[in-house]
């Protein structure tokens, strides 16, 4: 019995550390390669230089698309949360005819191959005159990230103890108060989880953004993809490092805000 | 407020009426051109967009993407196309011509067309080709003892696990298959001999990527030592200091051409035609040759000797070029890809 | 108020509760069902259903191209189901999905559990670490994997140094490499899904079980697993779906040898421009995945009831 305990503890510990190392390795390699003096991507890096970061920062296309991607991801995430959370609540907490169909519909964007979705969306957005606009990109990304919100929030809501909200309402709290002070704080881990999925999915998306892009409206992954067609230098690693920094900053900010919220 | 508006209106009227203050021909006009991104766009901006701005006041905006993406964008909105000039390679030309989204360009529209080599106008009056991209064999000079001399040499036992080529998504793969087929008695409508050769090559292949940077990566990381690759890409590796050498394959110099087309229903046709003219000019051709080693289609362009030797398809050597029947390729490609998937899978 | 205070809902996490008509209930008051669902459904109707309908129409075309084509035919679907090659690829793709979902569960659960029980300050950088790989563009991701799995790469370097092999072994451009990269890519999703539900399970339940002399495995099997099931199912189905739709990874890491349905669809739609056939393949994939999802949800509910004793 004790032996088994120790074995399990060791095993799970090893698995945990393997996972952390495994997840950290590719980003570390990329960041390290961004300092190489060679004109093509290589690891281990040869020499040390910050020239590629300088190049990236000075590159208007890269900086523009970095900004666009960040804005787009934030807007899409917020909208997806606003639209998807009530929908998840409806599926989980209420019974109505066609519930399973609605659930399937809400998850469908994830299953449709992105290329297919991209071409279909391009057509529809063109009919509406929204093709190659920021609004069009936002719509596409909301459709893309909605399933993540629904999935995550539904799981969270399923575990939510309804006696809490009943207790609050029996204490004469208004529905908006119940939501704000009982429901949301408890669902916060789920909201954070969903936000991270949404942000990362939107930021990293290539297919949809490529088809709906135009001149000044190119997202960063698409920019990288097309850059690579003709140049394969460490600027790519430098830009990727910048992306890591931006994403981390956004996530840590969200966590900190959520942390503060909990204490209030 | 009203006085200000009237004043502005009067000034504008004055300015537009006086010939002395006449604006450049395409002032205030924006031309949307599809392109391929990265360094390619930089050369285009320097040798085409900037001169056009200076000469005609025309603003050129490049929209990077793959040829297929750009085509899809135009097809989705053919009545109000988001692009005015479509830049694509030979293999995609039959598709756009059949779909009716591009217009023919005559020598009256663009006088410089007269200077183009015959091979730069493979599709009659459609499209103006501005550079050649030939396919060659390449090998790592430090690792390979006996250099390959042909595409078929990819099957040599000594290259086991060290050979690479493009798959059929990349036109380089298509040309390789075609070369293998035609050199064994087959042709564009009978590629069975080509697939027979591919079966021999298969055990040697480390990977069959679809994008040039992936193939370059294989070379740089030492995974692949011999490959069938685009000339421009091999020379770029060389320029980076990598020990790679070019071999003109025994099967011949198969090449494709990059074209610019005027999109149908564009609102700025005159500007688009001016763009085409600048793109095939000596200035732009020289830039492409120097940066990417793409040979010019414009016969009147003079290249310095060492550059001429590198780009291969220049001067008399142009007669060695082998062109594919791209319309037939387009028709057969689907079937070829299916066969490739079945045969080359694990 | 602590999460998990009070009795856990008796109806179980797998079964949604019926709407109560009691006026004291949150759902019955101002938030009408329609208002909850309307925005999401409208967006999906306009920007998912309509494109899909268009695609469905295209998949019923008889020819090899969608441009200017007319006619109705099941030819494309007959092609998919009548050809062993495509059926095999379909089966393999689903198989990969299951393998990756399972592997990410096994690898991800310990991490998710420890994260959920951690102080926020300790958790923060670890969560950031987990998100990191998701920020990498595919292009540089492939480069990183070439460095790790390549002939002169890290893994081979370690194996050679330890004397386990005499010469570098080919780890890339085969099925194994694709699975490893897919697992690596989707592990964060599984971890985060599981973490967010474990955080809602009262840690005192685990402590209580430990006090009753239950070992870690028993705690996992009888306390954690049943209660975290919604999150596990959510995470696993998410990973499953992402895996079967994947098309870039098999192309770049598979070396042209590994066929997944996603890459075949991409080929048909974007390269061969045979939208009818590509559309048919897409719908077959869509139908199968939705069916499996439905089955999984049912199983989640049923399984929960049997382990509750």
Image (cartoon, rainbow, N blue to C red):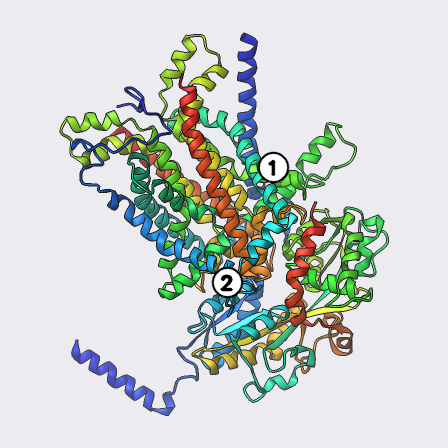
Please state if B35 lies on the left or on the right of C116 as rendered: right
In which quadrant is the N terminus of chain C drawn?
top left
**Does A55 sit above or below residue A200?**
below
Helix, strand or loop at mark 1:
helix
Measured from the top left, where is residue C5 in percent x and y?
Answer: 29, 21
Q: CA distance from mark 2 to mark 1?
A: 42 Å
Label 2 lies in what chain?
Answer: C
In which quadrant is the C terminus of chain C drawn?
top left
**Does B117 sit above or below residue B63?**
below
**Residue at 35%, 30% in the rendered image:** C15
Measured from the top left, where is residue C180 in percent x and y?
Answer: 60, 37
Question: Which residue has dot 2 on it?
Answer: C72
Callouts 2 and 1 close, C-beta under 8 Å: no
Which residue is at the far right?
B146
**Residue at 57%, 86% in the rendered image:** B106
Which residue is at the far left?
A172
Any part of residue B236 in sight: no
**Residue at 70%, 35% in the rendered image:** C156
Please state if A31 lies on the left or on the right of B297 as rendered: left
Helix, strand or loop at mark 2:
loop
**Residue at 69%, 50% in the rendered image:** B218
Q: Nearer the viewer, residue B70 or C261?
A: C261
Q: Nearer the viewer, residue C309 or A32?
A: C309
Q: Quadrant of residue B325?
A: bottom right
Question: Which residue has dot 1 on it?
Answer: C180
Disc 2 versus disc 1: nearer the observer: 2
């Amino acid at each position: 019995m004790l032996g088994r305990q120790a074995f399990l503890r060791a095993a799970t510990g090893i698995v945990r550390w393997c996972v952390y190392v495994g997840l950290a390795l590719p980003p570390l390699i990329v960041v390290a390669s961004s300092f190489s003096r060679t004109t093509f991507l290589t690891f281990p890096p040869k020499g040390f230089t910050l020239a590629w970061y300088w190049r990236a920062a000075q590159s208007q296309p890269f900086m523009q698309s970095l900004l666009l991607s960040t804005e787009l991801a934030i807007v899409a995430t917020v909208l997806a949360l606003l639209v998807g959370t009530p929908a998840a609540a409806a599926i989980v907490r209420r019974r109505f005819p066609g519930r399973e169909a609605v659930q399937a519909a809400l998850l469908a964007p994830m299953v449709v191959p992105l290329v297919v979705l991209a071409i279909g969306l391009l057509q529809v957005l063109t009919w509406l005159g929204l093709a190659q606009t920021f609004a069009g990109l936002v719509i596409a990304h909301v459709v893309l990230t909605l399933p993540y919100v629904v999935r995550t929030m539904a799981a969270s809501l399923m575990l939510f103890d309804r006696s809490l909200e009943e207790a609050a309402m029996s204490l004469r709290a208004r529905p908006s108060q119940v939501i704000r002070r009982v429901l949301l704080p408890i669902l916060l881990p789920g909201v954070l989880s969903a936000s991270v999925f949404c942000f990362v999915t939107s930021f990293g998306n290539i297919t949809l953004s490529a088809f709906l892009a135009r001149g000044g409206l190119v997202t960063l992954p698409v920019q990288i993809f097309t850059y690579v067609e003709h140049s394969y230098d460490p600027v790519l690693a430098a830009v990727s490092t910048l992306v890591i920094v931006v994403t981390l900053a956004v996530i840590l900010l969200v966590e900190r805000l959520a942390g503060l919220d909990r204490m209030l | 407020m009203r006085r200000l508006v009237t004043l502005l209106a009067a000034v504008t009227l004055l300015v537009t009426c006086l010939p002395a203050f006449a604006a450049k021909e395409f002032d205030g006009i924006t031309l949307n051109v599809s392109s391929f991104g990265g360094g390619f766009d930089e050369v285009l901006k320097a040798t085409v967009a900037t001169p056009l701005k200076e000469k005609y006041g025309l603003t050129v905006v490049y929209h990077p993407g793959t040829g297929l993406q750009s085509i899809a964008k135009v097809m989705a909105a053919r009545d109000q196309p988001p692009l005015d000039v479509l830049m694509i390679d030979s293999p995609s030309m039959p598709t756009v011509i059949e779909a009716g989204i591009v217009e023919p360009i005559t020598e009256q529209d663009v006088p410089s067309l007269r200077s183009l080599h015959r091979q730069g106008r493979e599709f009659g009056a459609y499209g103006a080709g501005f550079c050649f991209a030939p396919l060659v064999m390449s090998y790592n000079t430090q690792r390979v003892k006996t250099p390959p001399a042909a595409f078929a040499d990819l099957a040599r036992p000594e290259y086991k696990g060290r050979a690479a080529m493009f798959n059929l998504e990349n036109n380089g793969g298509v040309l390789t298959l075609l070369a293998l087929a035609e050199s064994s008695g087959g042709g564009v409508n009978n590629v069975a001999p080509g697939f027979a050769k591919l079966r021999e090559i298969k055990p040697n292949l480390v990977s069959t990527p679809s994008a040039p940077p992936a193939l370059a990566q294989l070379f740089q990381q030492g995974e692949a030592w011999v490959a069938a690759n685009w000339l421009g890409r091999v020379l770029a590796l060389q320029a980076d200091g990598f020990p790679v050498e070019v071999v003109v394959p025994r099967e011949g110099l198969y090449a494709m051409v990059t074209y610019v087309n005027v999109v149908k229903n564009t609102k700025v046709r005159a500007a688009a035609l001016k763009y085409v003219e600048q793109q095939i000019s000596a200035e732009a051709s020289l830039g492409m040759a120097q940066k990417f080693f793409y040979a010019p289609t414009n016969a009147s362009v003079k290249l310095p000797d060492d550059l001429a030797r590198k780009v291969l398809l220049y001067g008399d050597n142009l007669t060695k070029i082998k062109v594919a029947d791209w319309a037939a390729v387009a028709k057969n490609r689907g079937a070829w890809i299916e066969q490739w998937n079945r045969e080359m899978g694990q | 108020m602590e999460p998990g205070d009070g009795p856990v809902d008796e109806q179980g996490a797998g079964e949604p509760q019926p709407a109560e008509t009691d006026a004291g209930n949150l759902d019955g008051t101002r938030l009408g069902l329609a208002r909850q669902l309307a925005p999401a459904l409208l967006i999906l109707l306009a920007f998912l259903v309509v494109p899909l309908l268009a695609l469905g129409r295209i998949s019923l075309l008889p020819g090899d191209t969608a441009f200017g084509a007319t006619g109705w035919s099941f030819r494309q679907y007959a092609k998919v189901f009548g050809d062993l090659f495509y059926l095999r690829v379909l089966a393999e793709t689903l198989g990969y999905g299951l393998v990756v979902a399972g592997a990410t569960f096994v690898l991800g659960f310990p991490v998710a559990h420890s994260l959920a029980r951690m102080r926020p300050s300790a958790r923060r950088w670890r969560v950031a670490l987990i998100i990191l790989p998701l920020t990498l563009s595919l292009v540089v991701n492939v480069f990183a994997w070439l460095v790790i799995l390549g002939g002169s790469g890290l893994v081979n370097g370690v194996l050679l140094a330890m004397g386990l092999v005499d010469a570098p072994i080919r780890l890339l451009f085969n099925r194994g490499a694709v699975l490893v990269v897919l697992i690596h890519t989707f592990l964060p999703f599984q971890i985060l899904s599981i973490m967010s539900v474990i955080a809602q399970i009262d840690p005192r339940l685990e402590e209580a079980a430990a006090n009753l002399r239950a070992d870690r495995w028993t705690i996992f099997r009888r306390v954690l697993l049943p209660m975290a099931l919604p999150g596990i199912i959510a995470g696993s189905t998410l990973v499953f779906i992402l895996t079967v739709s994947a098309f870039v990874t098999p192309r770049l890491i598979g070396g042209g040898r590994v066929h997944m349905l996603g890459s075949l669809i991409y080929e048909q739609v974007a390269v061969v421009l045979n939208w009818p056939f590509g559309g048919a393949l897409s719908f077959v994939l869509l139908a199968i995945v939705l069916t499996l999802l439905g089955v999984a949800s049912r199983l989640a509910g049923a399984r929960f009831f049997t382990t509750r004793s």
